[in-house]
Amino acid sequence: MILPARPKKQSGFTLIEILIVIALIGIIGTAFLSNFFSSIARGRDSRRKQDLRSITQALELYYSDNQSYPDSLPAVGVKFTHPDNPDTLYLQETPGDPQTDKIYCYESDGSWYRLTANLENTSDPDVLTTAVWCGGIDYNYGIASPNITL
């Protein structure tokens, strides 16, 4: 007696199933990368804020010693000392922007100062509602001496 041939069991995935899996991986990967890059930007913004606070503390120490603020800041990576007394150290190393490594924008006439930077996360609660102009560029975050406003 001849038995009918059994249908051959097919294993594997259909093209539709593979495309759905690839699409899901793409969506999850995009969400992950977006979150990852925004976390990196927030980290750089946090560093910018801390850098400006450090410079501000150094400027206030300088002011209490000299009754004026310096005309300019030292270059990035250079010690911030008193010009006439290099042994008076205000800042071990002048910080720069974590992304560009350029110095933060600093303006002063000796009686006041303004220190500004650009935050990448424009939805940060510390972003200024009105941009501050410094050195020909608009900045969205800053700190000023106690006797002026941004």
Image: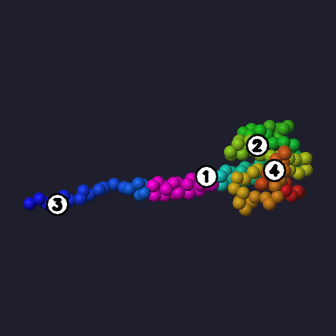
**Residue at mark 3:** 4
The CA distance from mark 1 to mark 4 is 24 Å
Q: State the SS at label 1.
A: helix
Which of the 4 image quadrants contains residue 71?
top right
Looking at marks 3 and 4 on the same chain, the residue that comes earlier in the sequence is marked by 3
**Residue at mark 4:** 138
Quarter occupied by the C terminus: bottom right
Which residue does the image show at 78% across and 41% down from the upper left? 80
Residue situated in front as seen by the camera: 88 or 35: 35
Q: From what the image shows, is residue 71 above or below residue 130?
A: above
The CA distance from mark 2 to mark 4 is 15 Å
Which range of residues does the magenta coloring cover? 19-40
In the picture, the disc for residue 103 is 2
Looking at marks 1 and 2 on the same chain, the residue that comes earlier in the sequence is marked by 1
Local crowd at mark 1 within 10 Å, few (<14), some, or many (≥20)? few
The CA distance from mark 1 to mark 3 is 61 Å
Q: State the SS at label 3.
A: loop
Looking at marks 3 and 2 on the same chain, the residue that comes earlier in the sequence is marked by 3
Indicate the amino acid at tag 3. Pro
Mark 1 vs mark 3: in front: 3
Looking at marks 2 and 4 on the same chain, the residue that comes earlier in the sequence is marked by 2
Image position of 137 (left or right of 14): right
In the picture, the disc for residue 37 is 1
Which residue does the image show at 79% across and 40% down from the upper left? 74
The CA distance from mark 3 to mark 4 is 82 Å
Residue 98 position, x and y percent, is 68, 46
Q: State the SS at label 2.
A: loop
Looking at marks 1 and 3 on the same chain, the residue that comes earlier in the sequence is marked by 3
Image position of 79 (left or right of 65): left
Question: Is residue 101 covered in magenta?
Answer: no
